[in-house]
Image (cartoon, coloured by chain):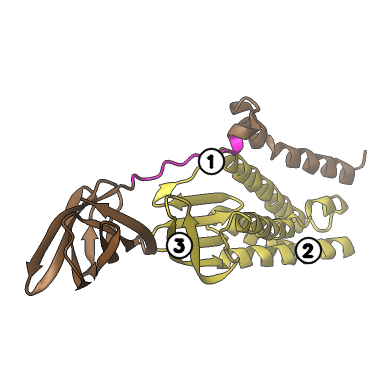
Amino acid sequence: MIDIKINFFGIVASLLLFYIILSNKPWWILRGGEGIFYAAVSPFNVKIEILGRPVIVPIIFYLNLTAMLSMLLAASTMLLGSFLAEKEWSRPMIGFKGLMLPILFLVGLIISLEFVKNMGIAVPLMGEFILRYEIPIGQGIITETPSVAMLTSDYWIALLAGIISVLAWFFQRRS
Amino acid sequence: MNRTKAVRILITLLSIAAFLPLLYGLNSYNWDLKALLTPSYTPPKVDFRMEPEGLRFEQGKLILSIKLTNLGEIEAKIEGLNVTLYSNGIAVATGSLEKPVLSRPNSTEELKISITSFHGIPSKIEAKGETFIRVLGSLVRVPVEIRG
């Protein structure tokens, strides 16, 4: 009988990580009106549109690529390390970068929303709201836009993958 | 050097290599971080012109006709327009939009303002008020001043 020891948590976490990287779906969505503004944000892709026209920040593309490569590396090494759980040298392959990313993403999002709030635009992390904004032109143009913000199921899957990767890390340490 | 250490070093090197796109981006922009951080956006043209056409009686009602020209690229629905008419700086009448009007890009529509209470008909139209415009699901309140 062949007795192969594998890190089950690591395999599950890495497969979930591969899914969230390759699905390329947004983790957080902000939608205002019927196309007034739209933002679909994930560490791997950021799409922002105002009045149907894209807003492009050059650094975002390179940051997304960096995040994608980092996570592909983390998922690959975790998958490999999970199948080589018996080998002592496989320990560094199992890390918890998978948990860092959803946490950093959420922290970054909260900081960004606070920054935007200081500019007079109050956007919650989640929920439906009316965005009131005064455009300082002439006597002032007041806009009221029914909006919605939400963390998508892909964010929660990413967080779950992160939590499972921590379990995988503990399992690898103990074995 | 033991294998664990070698694996750790290899993973660290690969993790650093993952930051190469960021370095490439910086290099592409001649290490100008400001240029890399500056957003670029070209908004669509938004240009509405209102010109008074005159006052007339229509089905027993006094109507102020306004020509609305949409020279922009965005469709808008004028849902309301409340104005006060002035004669020599004195308010003489008030009026409101009879029915919503859809204004498509590069088109001209007539806005019919029904004058509801008036104490005189001004010879020269001078109106002030505000209009409520629905643009892509957003309600926009814009102060208006019409002369003619």
Residue A3 visible somewhere in the drawing: no
Q: Amino acid at mark 3?
A: Gly
Q: Colour of chain B?
A: brown
Residue tagged 2: A166
User: Which residue ends up furthest to the right in the rendered image?
Assistant: B1
Instruction: Pinpoint the chain carrying mark 3.
Output: A
- Between A139 and B74, the residue placed more toward the observer is A139
Residue tagged 3: A32
Relative placement, left or right, of B50 versus A79 is left
- Magenta segment range? B36-45
As helix, strand or loop, the secondary structure at mark 1 comes to loop
Q: Colour of chain A?
A: yellow
Query: Pointers 1 and 3 in contact (CB under 8 A)?
Result: no
Q: Which residue is painted at 55% across and 41% down in the image?
A: A57
Residue A13, given in percent of the width and then of the height, sits at: 69, 62
Circle 3 crowding by C-alpha within 10 Å: few under 14, some 14–19, many from 20: many
Residue tagged 1: B39
Q: Which residue is painted at 36% across and 45% down in the image?
A: B44
Q: How many numbered circles does the render carry?
A: 3
Instruction: Pinpoint the chain carrying mark 2.
Output: A
Task: Examine the image and state in which quarter residue B55 appears.
Answer: bottom left
User: Please, is residue B22 above or below residue A110 in the view?
Assistant: above
Q: Amino acid at mark 1?
A: Pro
